Image: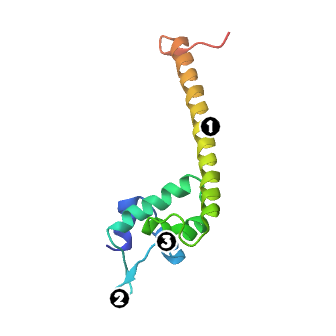
Amino acid sequence: MRIGQLASATGVSVRAIRHYDGLGLLNATREENRYRVFQAEDVERVKLIQLFLSAGFRLDEIRERAPCFRQGNTTLGAPVEEVRALYARKLADVAAQIAALQRLHEKLAAEAHHLEAQAVGGQISPPS
């Protein structure tokens, strides 16, 4: 598939895909006309990159571990303790994000409940 098709399939911009490819996160081949060609598995790889980015990984961290993710070997190219420490930091970051989102969820739910309770004839009554 071409870069535009990969962008459409993943919801990621063409520019970002070019950047990922330039960093070595993707393995595009080139046609005779120099267009990049991606494989079907690159859709999942881009989604995985996006997932790691949303969890707080930096592109350089993803790039360092990209061979691991492709081969399923989580320690490839790094000592086990280094990888374990990286994962522990990221797990703590994700747990903090989950806790913050849970607090936000509770706040929004409480506000929505308050607004429903205060609604009179389609209007919100002023706080007392």
* Badge 3 amino acid: Pro
Q: Nearer the viewer, residue 92 or 55?
A: 92
Residue furthest to the bottom: 32
Q: Residue at x 55, y 30 (%)?
A: 105
Q: Which residue is mark 1?
A: 100
Q: Which of labels 1 and 2 is toward the front?
A: 1
* Badge 2 amino acid: Asn
Mark 2 nearby-residue class (10 Å; few <14, some 14–19, many ≥20): few
- Tag 1 near tag 3, CB within 8 Å: no
Q: Position of residue 33 (x, y in %)?
A: 35, 88
Q: Earlier in the sequence, mark 1 or mark 2?
A: 2
Q: Position of residue 25 (x, y in %)?
A: 49, 71
Q: Earlier in the sequence, mark 1 or mark 3?
A: 3
Q: Nearer the viewer, residue 83 or 46?
A: 83
Q: Position of residue 110 (x, y in %)?
A: 57, 21
Q: Which residue is mark 3?
A: 67
Mark 1 nearby-residue class (10 Å; few <14, some 14–19, many ≥20): few
Residue furthest to the right: 128
Q: Residue at x 61, y 36 (%)?
A: 99
Q: Nearer the viewer, residue 19 or 76?
A: 76
